[in-house]
């Protein structure tokens, strides 16, 4: 374990972020380690922080984090920052979501309903470089559907800007609405959309939405 631990908590609920931060601070204080916890409440903040410095020891990413379209956020973070360990946190700890997160490269899965001591233990395990999944062992398994794997690889290939547009398309927004949401021109959106279509090998936004939905299980 490093002497200076850096963790990102990506969750849009400030009370939960605060609770996890306190749990982490209590954990590392016991281990006599210095810790820096960065709390972020939007997907743009996640990328901004990691683009400035990607030497974080762990990212705790909410499955239902706004702007990530379920587990698409995990796939894209793993693609853009492959050296940064990402663990998912969720109030929905069904086995299919856990297995999908595991298959898409998460190093762990934390349940929001777990006791603080259990969350602390799981984070401690993750910080030692091990995997942690509830009641399912520590070693990841590659048992997800081939089609999902291919979609995840395409999502991982998107730039942060392309990924943001991709998630908004999956939410049903039109180009004009996306331009307004991201404060960019509609022509810029169209350019990004053309590049996204090429990466996904599709010609229509409806096809893109169908593929994106394969990774949105965490929102159901």
Image: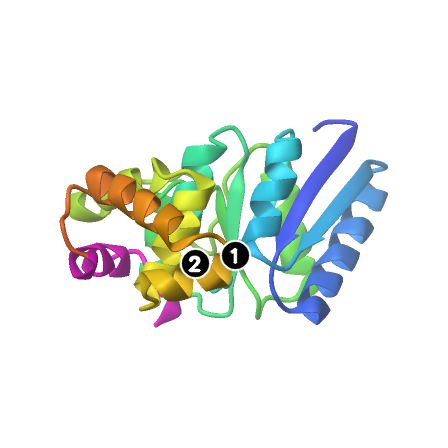
Q: Give the range drawn in magenta.
A: 205-220
Q: Which residue is drawn at 33% across and 60% down?
A: 175
Are discs 2 and 1 less than 8 Å apart at CB? yes
Left or right relative to 135: residue 2: right
Q: Is the magenta stretch mostly helix, strand or loop?
A: helix
Q: Is mark 1 on a helix, strand or loop?
A: loop
Q: Residue 214's quadrant in the figure? A: bottom left
Task: Name the residue tied to disc 2.
Answer: 179
In which quadrant of the rendered image does the N terminus lie? Answer: top right
Residue 212: numbered disc: none
Task: Judge by depth and name the residue closer to the eye, 58 or 199.
Answer: 199
Q: Is residue 95 visible?
A: no
Q: Distance between the residues labelled 2 and 1?
A: 6 Å
Task: Work out whether 178 lies above or below 29.
Answer: below
Q: What element carries label 2?
A: helix
Q: Is residue 136 magenta?
A: no
The image shows residue 128 at horizontal and vertical percentages of: 63, 33
């Amino acid at each position: 374990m490093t002497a200076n631990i850096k963790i990102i908590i990506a969750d849009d609920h400030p009370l939960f972020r605060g609770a996890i931060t306190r749990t982490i601070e209590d954990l590392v204080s016991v281990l006599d380690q210095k810790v820096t916890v960065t709390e972020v409440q939007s997907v743009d903040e996640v990328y901004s922080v990691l683009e400035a410095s990607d030497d974080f020891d762990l990212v705790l990413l909410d499955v239902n984090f706004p702007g990530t379209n379920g587990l698409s956020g995990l796939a894209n973070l793993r693609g853009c920052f492959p050296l940064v360990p990402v663990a998912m946190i969720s109030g929905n700890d069904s086995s299919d979501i856990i297995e999908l997160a595991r298959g898409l490269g998460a190093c762990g899965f934390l349940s929001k309903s777990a006791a603080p001591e259990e969350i602390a233990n799981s984070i401690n395990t993750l910080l030692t470089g091990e995997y942690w999944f509830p009641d399912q062992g520590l070693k990841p398994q590659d048992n997800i559907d081939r089609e999902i794997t291919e979609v995840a690889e395409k999502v991982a290939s998107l730039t942060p800007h392309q990924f943001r547009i991709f998630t908004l398309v999956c939410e049903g927004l039109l180009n004009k609405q996306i331009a307004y949401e991201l404060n960019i021109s509609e022509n810029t959106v169209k350019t990004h959309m053309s590049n996204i279509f090429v990466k996904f090998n599709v010609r229509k936004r409806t096809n893109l939405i169908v593929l994106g939905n394969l990774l949105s299980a965490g929102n159901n």
